[in-house]
Amino acid sequence: MTGRSTHTFVCPECRRSIEVDDAMRATLLETGCVVCGAPVTQEDIGEAPTVG
């Protein structure tokens, strides 16, 4: 799947780390961490290396 952008999310509260796509990134920014509910900022979601 080329062209797919992935990001690494690290929760500022519970410190869980998951790799997410663009749609999940937007959801996290809107609703917060899926594990603990903490608010999420763009700084909490970085670019992950993609294999191309």
Image (cartoon, rainbow, N blue to C red):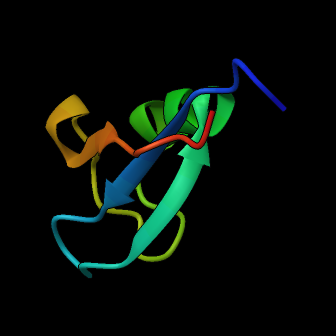
36 versus 48 height, above or below:
below
In which image quadrant can residue 11 be found?
A: bottom left
State the residue at coordinates (49%, 66%).
18
**Toward the viewer: 40 or 1?**
1
Q: Is residue 52 left or right of residue 9?
A: right
Q: Residue furthest front?
A: 52
Q: Is residue 26 left or right of residue 49?
A: right
Q: Position of residue 30 (x, y in %)?
A: 46, 31
Q: Residue furthest right?
A: 1
Q: Is residue 24 left or right of residue 26?
A: right
State the residue at coordinates (40%, 33%).
29
Quadrant position of the N terminus in the picture: top right
41 versus 18 height, above or below:
above
State the residue at coordinates (53%, 40%).
50
1 versus 40 height, above or below:
above
State the residue at coordinates (62%, 39%).
24
The number of numbered discs placed on residues in the rendered structure image is 0
In which image quadrant can residue 4 be found?
A: top right
Q: Position of residue 27 (x, y in %)?
A: 57, 35
Quadrant position of the C terminus in the picture: top right
Q: Position of residue 36 (x, y in %)?
A: 40, 75
**Toward the viewer: 46 or 43?**
46
